[in-house]
Image: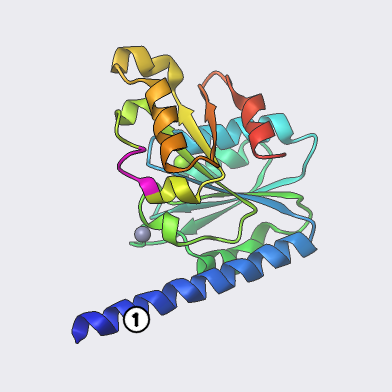
Amino acid sequence: MHKIVDLASEESLLAHNRELAEKINKQLKERGIRSVDVMGAIGSGKTTILEKLSERLKDRYRIGALAGDLTTTIDADRIGAHGVKTFQINTGKECHLDAHFISHAVDKVSEDIDLLFIENVGNLICPADFPLGADKRMVVISVTEGPYMVKKHPYIFREADVAVINKKDLAEPMQVSVKQLKEDVKTISPGTRVVIMCARTGEGIEELILALEL
Ligand code: MG
Ligand code: ZN
């Protein structure tokens, strides 16, 4: 009995989140704002990628960013250093962002921007269940996380429009096959575009911009 009640309430929680996400997407579109939800584990390179994207795109768009993190403002500070209007969402103990956090935070940055990045909390599990209302969902993994990151997280790759395989320069010392990781993505989610990058040097950033249709 207890379990049935829990499942029902979880389902309604997810349905509520999806509804709110659709509303957020509509609001952003009405304001002429494109949006990207960036997911991936801590240390995969999400913030570095957003720094590089911001540098490349700052003449084309007025950019804003929401950064989700348990307690720190490290990511918002780093992205903000590139002239991006940022707002940190501290989730406390919550291990993912949800549409409710976004609905409250979006007004803090949405004035005078045309592009919104949302950096999710570093985790590859629950963000899959909680769309935030972004036009595109992107997931980042790095070769330093080992060879099974895709196989072990099928749900998030199915959700993602774009998958980045980052830190390609470290593939050889790590003895991880970039080609295999790409094949794993294509097996799990044929429609997901794969971009191979070295965010630190900026390699692959143009391809990522194309994949995100920015
Ligand atoms: Mg980060
Ligand atoms: Zn979570």
Q: Which residues are magenta?
A: 150-154
Q: Which residue is mark 1?
A: 8
List x then y, in percent, for residue 55: 68, 30
> Which residue: 51% across, 40% down?
190
Where residue 49 appears, x then y in whole percent? 55, 33
Question: Is 130 above or below relative to 214?
Answer: below
Whether residue 96 is visible, yes or no, is: no
* Quarter where residue 62 is shown: top right
- The residue closer to the viewer here, 138 or 72, is 138
Q: What residue is drawn where x is 46% and y is 27%?
A: 166
- How many numbered dots are placed on residues in this image? 1
Left or right: 23, with 176 as reference point:
right
What's the image's color scheme? rainbow
Work out which quarter of the rendered image holds the C terminus and state it.
Answer: top right
User: In the figure, residue 54 lies in which quadrant?
Assistant: top right
Question: Is residue 204 located in the magenta-colored stretch of the structure?
Answer: no
The foreground one among 109 and 196 is 196
Q: Position of residue 163 (x, y in %)?
A: 50, 37
x, y percent for residue 203: 57, 19
Residue closest to the far left: 1
- State whether residue 30 appears in this view: yes
Residue 16's place in the image compared with 43, above or below, is below
Q: Residue at x 46, y 62 (%)?
A: 130
